[in-house]
Image: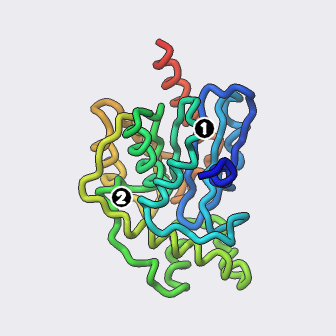
């Protein structure tokens, strides 16, 4: 992968010339890097944010979507190579939680253990929901998205926007519905699972099952008021919690 190809995978928010840590953020199904636009000013200046830009949307609209988890994780892993000179932490929301987990596995296989794996609004991989919404009609798929919460769902009422957004949404559902590892491997990184208290897609026991993928004593659950997209309304509170966990991780490394 060329340097140009690698750069198009991330929207980089840099506030310090020499960051101590990079936080790589993964959006949800149908989502974009814009989800994390407000995070950089809320984090310490020496934390650089890399928001992942999936193909098939926004300024990558002309590119084909990736519909297979292994291919997506492998490609992001490859694209991340120029940014491995600093410690990393990973935050993934919904589908992005599983992508972040898969990237953590790939990094650890090469001896790079993330400072923290932060997974949001998704059951542990071994509890993947067996649905087939990617093959449903447009209205059924849109209804499902609206059931999760009202995050820009009005765009689906505008025919021109609907035609632009649906292919990526359907491709992402095909990816996440095809991702059903029966025996996912544990990671060495500490795991924090975030959940909205009124998220209709998250059964608490299935979110708690992320603890099975962490070393003993290296898992925590954190809940916030709100639905599947709780992190939008609770952005300041969520980012403050993330920042505190990253600070503790860095302090532990220096101890």
Q: Secondary structure at mark 2?
A: loop
- Could you tell me residue 41's position as x and y percent? 73, 37
Local crowd size for mark 2, using a 10 Å CA cut-off: few (<14), some (14–19), many (≥20) = some
Residue 136 visible here: yes
- Residue at the outermost left position: 183
Q: Name the residue nearer the viewer: 55 or 82.
A: 82
Can you tell which quarter of the image residue 239 is in?
top right
Q: Is residue 168 above or below residue 1?
A: below
Q: Is residue 38 above or below residue 30?
A: above
Residue at 53% x, 35% y is: 88
Taking 78 as reference, is 126 left or right? left
* Residue 83's disc number: 1
Q: Is residue 240 above or below residue 34?
A: above
Residue at 64% x, 69% y is: 63
Q: Which residue is mark 2?
A: 203
- Could you tell me residue 183's position as x and y percent? 24, 53
């Amino acid at each position: 992968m060329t340097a140009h190809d690698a750069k198009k995978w991330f929207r980089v928010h840099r506030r310090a010339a020499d960051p101590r840590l990079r936080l790589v953020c993964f959006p949800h199904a149908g989502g974009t890097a814009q989800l994390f636009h407000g995070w950089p000013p809320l984090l310490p200046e020496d934390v650089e944010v890399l928001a992942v830009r999936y193909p098939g949307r926004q300024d990558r609209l002309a590119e084909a979507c990736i519909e297979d988890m292994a291919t997506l994780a492998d490609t992001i892993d490859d694209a991340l190579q120029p940014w491995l000179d600093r410690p990393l932490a990973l935050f993934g929301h919904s589908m992005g939680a599983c992508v972040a987990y898969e990237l953590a596995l790939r990094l650890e296989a090469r001896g790079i253990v993330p400072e923290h794996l932060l997974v949001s609004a998704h059951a542990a991989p071994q509890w993947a929901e067996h649905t087939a919404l990617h093959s449903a009609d447009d209205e059924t798929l849109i209804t499902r998205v609206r059931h999760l919460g009202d995050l820009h769902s009005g765009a689906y009422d505008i025919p021109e926007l609907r035609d632009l957004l649906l292919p990526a949404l359907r491709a992402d559902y095909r990816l996440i519905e095809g991702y059903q590892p029966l025996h996912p491997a544990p990671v060495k990184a500490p795991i924090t699972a975030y959940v909205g208290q009124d998220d209709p897609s998250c059964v608490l026991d299935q979110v708690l099952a992320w603890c099975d993928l962490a070393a003993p004593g290296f898992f925590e659950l954190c809940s916030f008021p709100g639905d599947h997209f709780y992190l939008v309304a609770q952005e300041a509170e969520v980012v403050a919690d993330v920042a505190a966990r990253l600070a503790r991780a860095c302090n532990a490394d220096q101890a």
